Every structure is written in C-alpha cells, then in structure tokens.
Image (cartoon, rainbow, N blue to C red):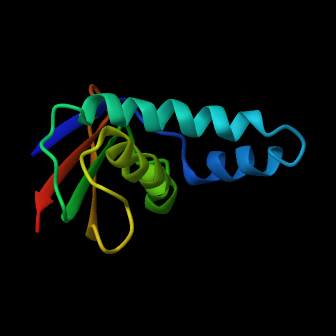
Amino acid sequence: MKFNVPGRFPGTNEIIEAAKLCKRNYKEYAVMKDTYTNMVAWLAKKLPKYECVNLIITWYEPNEKRDIDNVSGGVKFICDGLVRAGTIPNDTRKYVKSITHKFETDRQNPRIEIEVEAV
C-alpha cells in the first residue's frame, strides 16, 4: 500500500537545531515532531494493519539542494506516525524489517511517497 505526504519535512539539520533548542525551550522540537508525526498518522489511517513491514520511501524534493541524509531525516516522523495510526504495532526491528530510501526531483509537487509492504 502507498500513500503520499504533501510537501517536505524539516531536514536533519533543522531537526538537530530544534533538539538543541530543547535544552532551553523543550517546545520547538516537541511541536515539530508532533506536527509531522500526526500528519503521517492521519494519512496512514486508511492503511490495513500489519504485523511486520518493509518501508520504501521516495523523497520528492523541488530541487537537489539538500543532501540526501538531510532530506531523509524525517524518517522518524514516518515510523512514529505509522505506529500512532495503528498501521504497525511498534517501529522496532521486530516490526520494521527494512527501510529503503529513494530520491527524486519534482519541482511542481514535492512530496514523500511511502510504500508499506507486508513481510
């Protein structure tokens, strides 16, 4: 099953910066994580329940400016969102066997395509 998340997630650098700010103000990272995790959870509600999965995530960026490790930093939001939606019981290696990342450019429609495969 596939579903799309419109737009882009914050990059790894932005996530790290928000986490650093947590030492002074815990809210910035907490709000960021909750916002994107809830977005994934809401979109994943239509998916069936799985016991064990492989994830294939295609990151469609509007250009090639961000490094791929920076683009894919939002995988935490995806895994936690799938758990929050009840799509998978947990995001440990017992339930998520692999995560494959692909990177594409789509200037008109940046998005994240998430494919959930039963194992």
Quarter holding residue 99:
bottom left
Q: Quadrant of residue 110?
A: top left
Q: What quarter of the picture does the C terminus occupy?
A: bottom left
User: Which residue is most to the right?
Assistant: 24
Quadrant housing residue 102: bottom left
Residue at the image point whose x is 72% and y is 34% from the top: 28
- Vertical arrangement, residue 51 with respect to residue 35, above or below: below
Image x and y of residue 83, in percent? 35, 48
Q: Picture coordinates of residue 23 (x, y %)? A: 86, 49
- Residue 38, percent from left and from top: 43, 32
Which is more toward the observer, 96 or 3? 96
Q: Is residue 78 visible?
A: yes
Tell me: 105 left or right of 46.
Answer: right
Vertical position of residue 110 compared to residue 2: above or below: above
Which residue occupies 47% across, 54% down? 76
Marks counted in the figure total 0
73 sits left or right of 27 in the view:
left
Residue lying at 75% horizontally and 33% vertically, measured from the top left: 27
Residue drawn where x is 35% and y is 36% of the image:
40
Horizontal side of residue 91 vs 117, given as left or right: right
> Relative to the observer, which residue lies in front, 112 or 22?
22
* Res 71 seen here: no
Q: Is residue 90 left or right of residue 54?
A: right
Locate residue 41, reporting x and y percent: 34, 35
